[in-house]
Each structure stands twice: as C-alpha cells, then as structure tokens.
Image (cartoon, grey):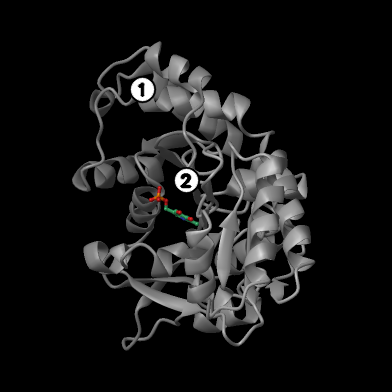
Amino acid sequence: MNKNRIDLRSDTVTLPPQEMRDAMSKAELGDDVYGEDPTVNLLQERCAQLTGKDAALFVPTGTMGNLSSVLSHCQRGDEVILGSRSHIAIWEQGGASAFGGVSLRTIANEADGTLPLEQISLCINDDNVHRTTTKLIALENTYNGQPLTPAYMRMVKEIALQNGLAVHLDGARLFNASRALLASIDEFTAHVDSVQFCFSKGLSAPAGSIICGNHEFIAKARRIRKALGGGMRQAGVLAAACIWALDNMVERLDIDHALAMQLAQGLSEIEGIRVAPAKHRTNMVFFESDRADLSVQELARRLRDIGVLVAVEGQLGIRAVTHFGLTTEDIEEVVLRVEQLMGVPASL
Ligand SMILES: Cc1ncc(COP(=O)(O)O)c(C=O)c1O
C-alpha cells in the first residue's frame, strides 16, 4: 500500500494478490451461458454446499445478486419488507421497484442492524384488496459491520413461515459475520430461502457474487440474470479468483477485525473524537468529532488532505473500513495523523 495514502473507504478497494491472479490465469474455461464453464460450475457447487442450499448462481455483482433474488421471489405489485438503511433500500437505485414493480416496505433498522420482530409482523399485509401482497423479508448481514446472530435470523424465519413469506439475506459480508460470531455459514443460511454474498469485498476478488437457494429459485434467477445482462461467457476467469478467495481469504478476515479494533481503540483515545460503540467489531469503525467546528464532511475532507481516505455515511458519521493490504503500522499511522489533525483548529 502507498504509505502516503491510506484508503479506508471500503473493503472493495483491495487488489487481488498474485496467487489469486495465477489461479485466474490457469482457470479451465467454457461458455457459462451454456452452463459449460467448469470453474463457474465448481464455484456454484461449493457455494451451494457451504450454504446448505440446492444450487447456486454466479453473478457479477452484489447488486445484481440482490436484484435477481428479489425479482425471483416477487412479481409486480408484491412487496418486500426490509431495513430502512439496508443496501437494497438505499444503495441500489430502488432496482426492485424500477425494474420489477416490487414495492419496498421499510422498517427503521436498530443500531445493531436488526429489524424489531413486532414491526415485521405489523408490516405484513393481510389479504385485502387495498394492499400489496407481502412476499419477502430481506435482511442484511453484516449490517454496517454489525453481525446479526443466527438466533435472531431464526426468529425472523419463524415469522416468515407463519405468514407464507420467503426470506432473502443480503450477505455481502456474511463471512465477516461468520468469523466474528464463530458460527458457520450454514448456521446463518439455514434460516433464509436465498442468500447473496460477495467475493469482491473483504475476500479481495476483483468481481463476483453468488446467490444460493432451491432449484426452482435458481432456475428463475438464471433467467432474470440473463435479462439483466449478467449472463457472462468465460466467467471462470472470475470464478477462479472466487474459489481461491474461499480457500485463502476467509480466515484472514480475523486480521481485518483486529485492525478495526486497533483503530477504534486508538481513535477513541483522541480528544474530540467519538467512536460509535459496537457489540461485535468486524471490519468497520464509525466515528465523528464532537467539536462544533468540525462537521463530518469537514472532518472527512481534512482527513483526505492528510492522505486518509474515508467514507461519509449519513447519520452514522465517518466510516473507516479495514481490509487486506493494511497493516498494524498503517493503523498506527492513521491514528497519529488524526491526532495531529485534531490538535489543529479547523479554521487553519
Ligand atoms: C451490504 C451490501 N450489499 C450489497 C452490495 C452491492 O455489491 P456490489 O457493489 O458488488 O454491487 C454492497 C456493496 O458495497 C453492500 O455493502
């Protein structure tokens, strides 16, 4: 990593390690739209097994994975219940509504990412000519770095079952949740009908996500993926990176989590900086300044000027994400730079 610029905007900024690139260059390939790419097929089989589902489908991005999933579960006029600050609700251009005519019924996320169970029940429409048809509940794990427990997900699934609904999981960073809570992937996915997770976040692949579910769901999602322009040909080049990531990048997420802990600790000792508490820390730290002259935007701008890149996340303040390629020295350097910045009045 360039020592002058420390990039904490996201875990998507990682570059694939050389061994991953080697695996990509050696991948056995075929045309995946014909279902003939052996590397894609292997990745799909492995992910279906990992999540305990019948089948899986490789997609280029998490956004397409979520969209294909919602459109497979729902028809025009159906409704999905989801968090008001979830990625599907606010960071995917409302694709489910725009492309599928599916309405989004949002519930305010608790700080830990959960949706209050009684709120979920209240939002399920009865069979009434005035109302949309509720079809799906969508959860996100991790939610802004907070892992949802399998026990919570089981309770959501119970509500869904009682009401004939499906549950989809946006598990873009599900491996982070799995490492943080010491729970296997299928302990989470046992409580959902479909899941999408990303290889291009903490796992450092250049692209690629997967969706998993039963045979009928995956068959529908395959058609929708094609309609959305996501049918790729020799996609095994990318799938090889994802397989390599599954084998080599999952356990090392613990390092990212330890770096986030180090960052949170270091920042919290700086006068004028307030770090948001987290019950379980994965790879994200949210913080802001309590100085009236230093808004979140101003703090982010001044951090950029001293070579620390961060994201601004609405009411949550500044988001710093740890990832592959960062070291403890980088985090020490970030803390040092923030300390120096906070010692200088904002007007200078
Ligand atoms: C929680 C969550 N879901 C979905 C996505 C979408 O993934 P992609 O950028 O691959 O479309 C992201 C991207 O950051 C995300 O954070």
Q: Residue at x 61, y 78 (%)?
A: 345
Asked if 340 appears above or below 223 in the picture, the reply is: below
Could you tell whether 197 is left or right of 228 in the image? Answer: right
Check disc 1 and give the amino acid type.
Answer: Gly
Residue at 47 percent of width and 29 percent of height: 16
Taking the image as shown, residue 144 lies to the left or right of residue 24, namely: right
Instruction: State which quadrant residue 316 falls in.
Output: bottom right
Q: Residues within 10 Å of mark 2 (few under 14, many from 20)?
A: many
Q: Position of residue 11 (x, y in %)?
A: 53, 47
Task: Give the residue displayed 68% in from the left and 52% down from the top.
Answer: 282
Q: Residue 162: x, y in percent?
A: 59, 69
State the separation of the CA atoms marked 1 and 2: 20 Å
SS at circle 1: helix
Labels in figure, total: 2
Ligand 1 neighbours mark 2 (CB distance < 8 Å):
yes
Closest to the observer, 246 or 76: 246
Q: In the drawing, does residue 181 fall left or right of residue 63?
A: right
Using a 10 Å C-alpha cutoff, classify the residue at mark 1 as few (fewer than 14 neighbours), some (14 to 19) or many (20 or more): many
Q: Nearer the viewer, residue 233 or 221?
A: 233
Which residue is at 31% across, 64% downward? 96
To which residue does mark 2 refer?
12
Going from N to C along the chain, the mark reached first, 1 or 2, is 2
Res. 198 visible in picture = yes
Is 92 on the left or on the right of 186, as rendered? Answer: left
Q: Nearer the viewer, residue 289 or 277?
A: 289
